[in-house]
Amino acid sequence: MNPKETIKGRGAQQNVHNRFFSEIHETRDDFLEFCRVEGEEADQNRTQYLPIFPKTIVNKVTSPDVGMQYSMNPYQGCEHGCIYCYARNSHEFWGYSAGLDFERKILIKKDAPKLLEAKLKSKNWKACTIVLSGNTDCYQPAEKKFKITRACLEIFLKYRHPVAIITKNSLILRDLDLLKELHKYGLVGVNVSITSLSEETRRILEPRTATIKKRLETIRVLSENKIPVNAMLAPIIPGINSHEIMNLAKAVSEAGAISFAFTVVRLNGAIGQIFTDWIRKTLPDRADKVLHQIEACHGGTLNDSRFGVRGRGDGKIAKQIHDLVRIARHMYFKDQVFPKLNTSLHEEYKKGQLRLF
């Protein structure tokens, strides 16, 4: 591989055509921020932080195989730059590319705490776990500057409402004080994503994420503070990290995770083109093998959109992955169950508030 052919510090190596627009629209250079990755010369295109003002922040999840009913995302787009990320496609709805735009143009929802509070105060709202980061990571680099996620956690605590978090950033430990308070009432669970134990793999797959060492330490600190942690070993990519399943399960178990979940990678929408371009530039010697093995998990294509199958895959390679997962769970997580979060306190809180009037 010729280093000059790749954009350092980014996952995607190109912007792909937005299927909803004839061309990508120009945006204002608000909230400019430049981020360098450790030990590498990052690309010179600055990350733009662009404020947006949605009318709602809590989204109902209608897909039957996702495992959550409601989600909220303080940020749209993600500077982590994970090359496989399914959320890339959602950036097209805003007029941007799912490629480099997804990593460089981060939309900031500053009103998220206010919108969340209005939702939780609604007479029609019944307590149900809301997942922070159902789409993009709520602890991505932008959070260090804007602190929207922290403000939302304060709202969840105030209204005694359950919240789950998905992240691959150790920045979550900044909010350990709030997480400990939420846990006192059984209101929080954390999912820490870790896809490899190899820093080399991490750096090319997820260029601006926390190191593997920091993620394992994050699991350890959260667990030591009794906060339940589920490890997200996702996605499993044949030929890249599929051989690590047993070692990953052992490592997150030893760090204190109660359980782990996984998905088999699928490259839907624009992600197929972005991933293919990336792997041919980054891992050219393995590109064909990896792409063919992904296709073997999805009936000969890079993506299968069928509910219940799309994230699990099928075929011989997918079966091998499932067999390893089953063995890993038996060896390292036998009889462990991730706790259900408490939904009763929020209703009691609302009744108490109503009695004041």
Image: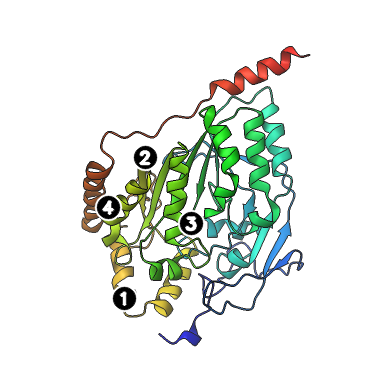
Q: Name the residue under label 1.
A: 286
Q: Which amino acid type is shown beneath numbered disc 2? A: Ile
| Depth check, front residue: 273 or 328 | 328
> What's the distance in space between the residues labelled 1 and 2, CA to CA?
34 Å
Mark 3: secondary structure: helix
| Depth check, front residue: 251 or 79 | 251
Residue neighbourhood size for the residue with mark 2, other residues' Cα within 10 Å, grouped as few (<14), some (14–19), many (≥20): many
How many numbered marks appear? 4
> What's the distance in space between the residues labelled 4 and 3, CA to CA?
19 Å
* Circles 4 and 3 in contact, beta carbons < 8 Å: no
Mark 2: secondary structure: loop
Q: Mark 3 points at which residue?
A: 86
Indicate whether 351 appears above or below 175.
above
Residue neighbourhood size for the residue with mark 1, other residues' Cα within 10 Å, grouped as few (<14), some (14–19), many (≥20): few
For the C terminus, the quadrant is: top right
> What's the distance in space between the residues labelled 1 and 3, CA to CA?
22 Å
For the N terminus, the quadrant is: bottom left
Q: Name the residue located 34 percent from the left edge and 62 percent from the top edge.
A: 301
Residue neighbourhood size for the residue with mark 4, other residues' Cα within 10 Å, grouped as few (<14), some (14–19), many (≥20): some
Mark 4: secondary structure: loop
Given this view, does label 3 or label 2 mark the residue nearer the observer? 2
> What's the distance in space between the residues labelled 4 and 2, CA to CA?
27 Å
Mark 1: secondary structure: loop
Q: Mark 2 points at which residue?
A: 258
Of labels 4 and 2, earlier in sequence is: 2
> What's the distance in space between the residues labelled 3 and 2, CA to CA?
25 Å
Q: Which amino acid type is shown beneath numbered disc 3? A: Tyr
Q: Name the residue under label 4.
A: 314
Q: Name the residue located 69 percent from the left edge and 57 percent from the top edge.
A: 145
Of labels 1 and 3, earlier in sequence is: 3
Of labels 1 and 4, earlier in sequence is: 1
Q: Where is residue 292 in the image (x, y as percent from the top left)?
A: 29, 68
